[in-house]
Image (tube, rainbow, N blue to C red):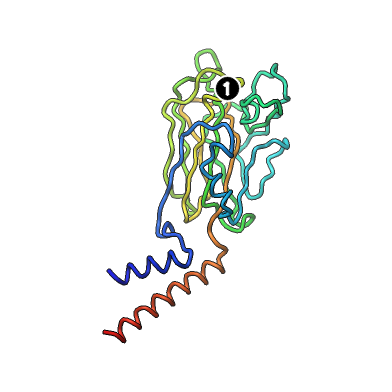
C-alpha cells in the first residue's frame, strides 16, 4: 500500500496526470454560444496546458485546421444579411453582425458523419475533441424540415477503433432553421489515450446536418518528454524502495 502511495505521489510530483491510468470524461450536450463562454476546453487553453490546440470555425470560408479529416460535405458561407434562408453558424446564430460559416452535408444520406484526426500531421492524437451541432434536417412526410425531439448521438473512438463512449441529446431540434441559438449544442470528449475519431448520428434519413466550432487539442507531452518523466518516476520509486530496505 505504501509503495502504491509513493508511486502516485511521484507521478503527481513529476507532472504525470493520474488520468494516464485510464479515464474518459464526457462533455455535454450543453448549450453553446461562444468558445470562450461555453467550451469546457477554454480554461485549459487559457492555462497554457495544451501541447497544441485548434478551433475550426470555418470563418475564413475554408476547412483548413491541421490534422482534421472531415466527412463528405462543404463549407456553407453565410453573408451577414438576415434574408439568407439558412443561417446556422455559431457566429450568425449570435446575430453579431459579422456573418458566419459552418460545415454541412447537403446530400440526402442515412449515414453517420465521422470526423477523424491525423496523428502524423498533429504529432499525436488529440486528448480533447468536441463539436457543436447547430441544426439537423431529416426527410419526413413533407420532405424536409427540422424534426423536433430527434435523438442525436456523438460517439468517440480510440486509436484501435474501439468506442470510448457516447454523448446523446435525446430531444434535439426545435423546427427552427434560421438564426436560433436554443438548439446549438456542444458534444465533447477527453481521453488521455488519444481520440482517433468521433461520429455524429441520428435516426432516419438525414437531409442536412450542420456543424460548427470543431475543436481539438492534446495535453500529452511529446514522447521524449513523457519517457523522461516516466523514467524519473521509476527512478525515484526505486530510490525510495532502497531507502526503506536500508532502514528495515
Residue at (64%, 41%) from the top-left corner? 56
Image location (x, y in percent) of residue 186: 51, 35
Work out which quarter of the rendered image holds the C terminus and state it: bottom left
Q: Residue at x 47, y 56 (%)?
A: 193
Q: Nearer the viewer, residue 149 or 115?
A: 149
Q: Say if 165 sits above or below 123 in the image.
A: above
In percent of width and height, residue 182 lies at 52, 24
Residue at point 47%, 20% (across, down)? 148
Is 107 above or below relative to 65?
above
- Left or right: 240, with 109 as reference point: left
Quadrant assignment, res 123: bottom right
Q: Residue at x 53, y 45 (%)?
A: 41
Element marked by disc 1 = loop
Q: Which residue is mark 1?
A: 180
Q: Quadrant of the N terminus?
A: bottom left
Q: Which quadrant of the figure has residue 245?
A: bottom left
- Residue at the top extreme, as displayed: 142
Foreground: 76 or 54? 54
Residue 51, placed above or below residue 96: below
Amino acid at each position: 500500500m505504501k509503495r502504491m502511495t509513493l508511486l502516485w505521489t511521484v507521478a503527481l510530483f513529476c507532472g504525470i496526470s493520474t488520468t494516464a491510468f485510464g479515464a474518459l470524461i464526457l462533455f455535454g450536450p450543453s448549450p453553446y454560444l461562444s468558445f470562450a463562454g461555453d467550451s469546457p476546453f477554454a480554461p485549459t487553453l487559457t492555462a497554457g496546458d495544451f501541447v497544441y490546440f485548434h478551433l475550426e470555425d470555418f470563418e475564413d470560408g475554408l476547412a483548413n485546421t491541421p490534422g482534421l479529416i472531415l466527412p463528405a460535405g462543404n463549407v456553407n458561407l453565410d453573408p451577414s444579411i438576415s434574408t439568407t434562408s439558412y443561417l446556422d453558424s455559431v457566429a450568425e446564430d449570435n446575430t453579431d453582425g459579422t456573418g458566419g460559416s459552418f460545415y454541412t452535408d447537403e446530400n440526402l444520406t442515412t449515414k453517420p458523419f465521422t470526423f477523424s484526426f491525423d496523428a502524423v500531421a498533429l504529432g499525436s492524437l488529440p486528448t480533447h475533441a468536441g463539436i457543436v451541432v447547430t441544426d439537423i434536417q431529416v426527410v419526413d412526410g413533407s420532405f424536409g424540415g427540422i424534426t423536433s425531439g430527434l435523438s442525436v448521438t456523438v460517439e468517440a473512438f480510440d486509436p484501435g477503433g474501439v468506442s470510448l463512449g457516447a454523448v446523446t441529446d435525446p430531444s434535439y431540434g426545435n423546427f427552427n432553421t434560421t438564426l436560433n441559438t436554443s438548439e446549438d449544442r456542444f458534444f465533447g470528449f477527453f481521453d488521455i489515450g488519444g481520440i482517433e475519431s468521433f461520429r455524429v448520428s441520428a435516426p432516419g434519413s438525414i437531409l442536412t446536418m450542420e456543424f460548427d466550432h470543431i475543436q481539438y487539442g492534446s495535453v500529452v507531452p511529446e514522447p521524449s518528454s513523457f519517457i523522461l518523466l516516466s523514467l524519473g518516476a521509476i527512478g525515484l520509486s526505486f530510490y525510495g524502495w532502497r531507502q526503506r530496505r536500508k532502514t528495515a
